[in-house]
Amino acid sequence: MTTIMEAVKKQEKAILQTYDYLHSIPEWGYEEVKTSAYVEKTLQEHGINVRRVTETGLVAEIDSGVPGPCIGLRADMDALPFTNEEGETYYCHACGHDSHMTMGIWTLLQLKELGLVKKGKIRGIFQPAEERLTGAKSMIKAGAAKGMDEFYGVHIRPIQEIPYGKAAPALWHGASVMAEIVVHGQTAHGARPHLGANAIDAAALVIAAINSIWLNPSDTWSAKVTRIHSGGSMVNIIPNKAVLSLDVRAARNDLMKEMVAKLEMACKAAAAVGCSAELKLGDAVPAAEYDQSCIDALGAAISHVLGQENCVPPLVTPGSDDFHEYKVADPALKTAFLALGSDAAPGLHNPAMHFKTEAMFTGVAILTEALASRVR
């Protein structure tokens, strides 16, 4: 009987061909037309049922026909936008989503070809717009996650975190919120500032208050003002409005709730100069909440494929991923997330990012082993 590793070894050239093509057609979130068409065609050609649930989002299933659990695997599809020297926008797979799709496709193909789905079903969710932080919500709304019992994700890791040849059975993402604080003042002539309320002065006080926020120092959290818009066409006009953009992160969902409450308190500092300020929460993703049995399944698969000495402890990252929206939508859903060492450098979200593509071979083997263990 062919083992999973033997099967993957035979398909290494084909796996790289899949990756090379997906890498060559990077597309922005919700615009993954060529990408999803290729994924759909490839899976259907191998007898896997695929349905399109959003314009570019796909759900693929391998059904054993025997009662059992529904085990899911998520692969994100979108690339990132960058600007070239001419000021033109171009797209690039600088976060490894092309590798995630490749591993997703080939995990399903190995499960199918080796007949490893003995009970229940395996579901592959090929999701758009992870980088826009809204793709998971669009798939959930379309019913892609309905009826799943367990759900797994995967992401290649930078060389600074986990080296090639090693992997972790859990990648603990933090919660992330993109927010704005809108400061309202009163316009006046620059020669008569006492008749107005300077929104820039108030913004400075609010920023100082934000920088004075403290949560438990043993936890990971941050609130950073990353952009300020204020002022008008004339220097001698007291501005009546300022808008602050913030990047807010916290290791846990309860910690993010506390941070948001303190940001609302920081807004009150604007009153010291006669202004008001309001916090507006924008795109957000929750922190990871995993199930130990799913983590153990990934850990066992990593140890089987790479050896126990190469199964490293769970990794905590300040980064975020909208994968965790599925858990929020269905609290009973059990989840885990594979952190795959790949020597990605110089770093994720860098247009020059590269990694050891051989990592995909072990990624496919680990995911195939882990998912197969849930449907034997």
Image (cartoon, rainbow, N blue to C red):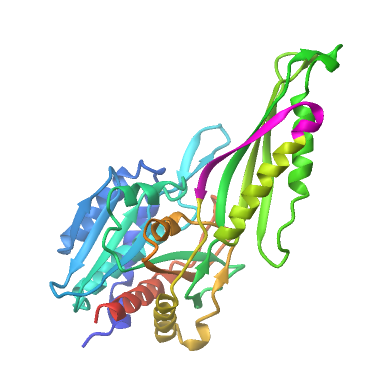
Q: Which of 280 and 43 is in front in this view?
A: 280
The rendered magenta stretch, by its main secondary structure, is classed as strand
Q: Give the range drawn in magenta.
A: 270-284
Answer yes or no: is residue 282 visible: yes
The structure residue drawn at horizontal position 40% and vertical position 65%, both measured from the top left corner, is 153
Give the percent coordinates (x, y) of residue 307.
Answer: 46, 87
Asked which quadrant contains residue 348, the reply is bottom right
**Left or right placement of residue 158 versus residue 306 in this view:** right
- Eyeballing the image, is 320 above or below 112? above
The structure residue drawn at horizontal position 60% and vertical position 62%, both measured from the top left corner, is 251
**Left or right placement of residue 232 versus residue 144 in this view:** right
**Left or right placement of residue 19 versus residue 233 in this view:** left
The image quadrant where one finds the N terminus is bottom left
The image quadrant where one finds the C terminus is bottom left
**Left or right placement of residue 294 versus residue 168 in this view:** left
Q: Which of 346 and 166 is in front in this view?
A: 166
Give the percent coordinates (x, y) of residue 372.
Answer: 28, 78
Q: How many marks?
A: 0
The structure residue drawn at horizontal position 78% and vertical position 13%, both measured from the top left corner, is 188
- Eyeballing the image, is 188 above or below 222? above
Q: Quick check: is 55 in the magenta stretch?
A: no
Most extreme residue toward the left, as rendered? 65
- Eyeballing the image, is 308 above or below 258? below
Give the percent coordinates (x, y) of residue 158.
Answer: 56, 64
Q: Quick check: is 273 in the magenta stretch?
A: yes
The structure residue drawn at horizontal position 42% and vertical position 57%, both measured from the top left corner, is 328
Answer yes or no: is residue 16 visible: no
Give the percent coordinates (x, y) of residue 242.
Answer: 69, 28
